[in-house]
Image (spheres, rainbow, N blue to C red):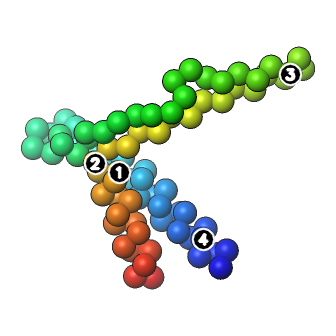
Amino acid sequence: SEKRFWLFLIFLFSGIIIGGLLGELAAGVSWLSWLAYGKSFGLTEPLVLDISIMQLTFKIMVTLNVASIIGIIIAVIVYKKI
């Protein structure tokens, strides 16, 4: 159902955000620094659409690290248990 889909997306984004934050915090701790290892991908230069009266700028960058991937896995497991 549609409610389940939105609930899944909320769990998924929560796992990504919380995991990413924990990964950034762990970067300063020597024995947890491996959690911050990751990669960024997306549009490095903004895409600009100029239609005379309005200018729209799009830029999407996604940064995944080990902690955010662990967060995604935990979010999926918790979602399945509910």
Kindly indicate the quadrant of the structure image that contains residue 52.
top right
Q: Quadrant of the C terminus?
A: bottom left
Q: Nearer the viewer, mark 3 or mark 1?
A: 3
The residue depicted at 54 percent of the width and 28 percent of the height is 43
Upstream in the sequence, badge 3 or badge 4? 4
The residue depicted at 40 percent of the width and 82 percent of the height is 81
Upstream in the sequence, badge 2 or badge 3? 3
Kindly indicate the quadrant of the structure image that contains residue 28.
top left
Which amino acid lies under the numbered mark 2 shown in the image of this protein? Val
The residue depicted at 17 percent of the width and 40 percent of the height is 33
Secondary-structure class at tag 1: helix
Q: Position of residue 38 (x, y in %)?
A: 30, 39
Answer yes or no: is residue 21 visible. no
Crowdedness near tag 3: few (<14), some (14–19) or many (≥20) residues, C-alpha within 10 Å? few
- Check whether the beta carbons of the residues at disc 1 and disc 2 lie within 8 A of each other: yes
Could you give the CA–CA distance between mark 3 and mark 4, rounded to whole angstroms?
35 Å
Residue 40 in the figure: left or right of residue 51: left
Give residue 66's mark: 2
Secondary-structure class at tag 2: helix
Give residue 5's mark: 4
Upstream in the sequence, badge 3 or badge 1? 3
Q: Which residue has dot 3 on it?
A: 51
